[in-house]
Image (cartoon, rainbow, N blue to C red):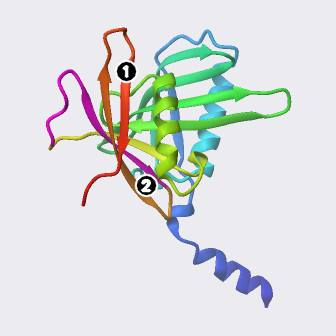
Amino acid sequence: MWQLSLIFLFCLLPTSLKASNCHVTFTDSNTSSIINKEIKKEIQSYLKSNSCSPVLTNSDIQFEITRIFEESGTIYLFGALSQEENCLITLFSIEKGWFSTTTNMLFMAADLPPTPPLFRDICSIAQAALPNSLSNYQVLIQKLENPKPPIGGKLQTWTFYNLEEWIELIVVAIPTSDGGTDIAVMQPTQ
């Protein structure tokens, strides 16, 4: 009798916890220290065990890798993550250790995305406005349409979300004369 109750309980789990199937293709040659077969396995495993809901649902996803690069032992996979009519610029990272491999989706973007170092800088500033660690969130970057950006600058909405939270922050990025970028992160006014 308890087995029947257990089966019934699994049937009641929300569909947002289901995994997404992912078809991975490569349009860039891979010169990284990880072979294509292993990259494909890592991306598919990540998407099967991490929900992207509500941005992407639990149906088939395509990931077309357009650029692979390695920096300080971390492999970055840049490409288009798509599902039906949704297509987002996405950056994954893979860190291969002696005993385990860690794969993360750094962001999905509907606007021009930042470089990995700029992404890390913005996230470290944004952490002060988040109730939990950055590892608890997916990141969606979108262009902020309404306000006028500063001269030469860019305004974006960065959404940090998971199944329980949806936190939007405004990111202002202004290029500096020395080739860097000044950044401000603020919560939108209601």
Q: Residue at x 44, y 26 (%)?
A: 79
Q: What is the secondary structure assignment of the residue under circle 1?
A: strand
Q: What is the secondary structure assignment of the residue under circle 2?
A: loop
Judge from the rendering whether residue 140 lies leftward or rightward of residue 49; answer left or right. Answer: left
Which residues are drawn in magenta?
147-161
Does residue 137 lie above or below 33 as drawn? below
The picture places residue 3, in percent across and down from the top left corner, at: 78, 83
Q: Which residue is mark 2?
A: 57
Asked whether residue 91 is in view, the answer is no
Classify mark 2: residues with Cα within 10 Å, few (<14), some (14-19) or many (20+): some
Mark 1 touching mark 2, by CB under 8 A?
no
Residue type marked 2: Thr
Q: Can you tell which quarter of the image residue 140 is in?
A: top left
Whichever of callouts 1 and 2 sits on the residue coming sooner in the sequence is 2
Residue type marked 1: Thr
Q: Which residue is mark 1?
A: 181
Q: Residue at x 69, y 27 (%)?
A: 95
The picture places residue 46, in percent across and down from the top left corner, at: 61, 42
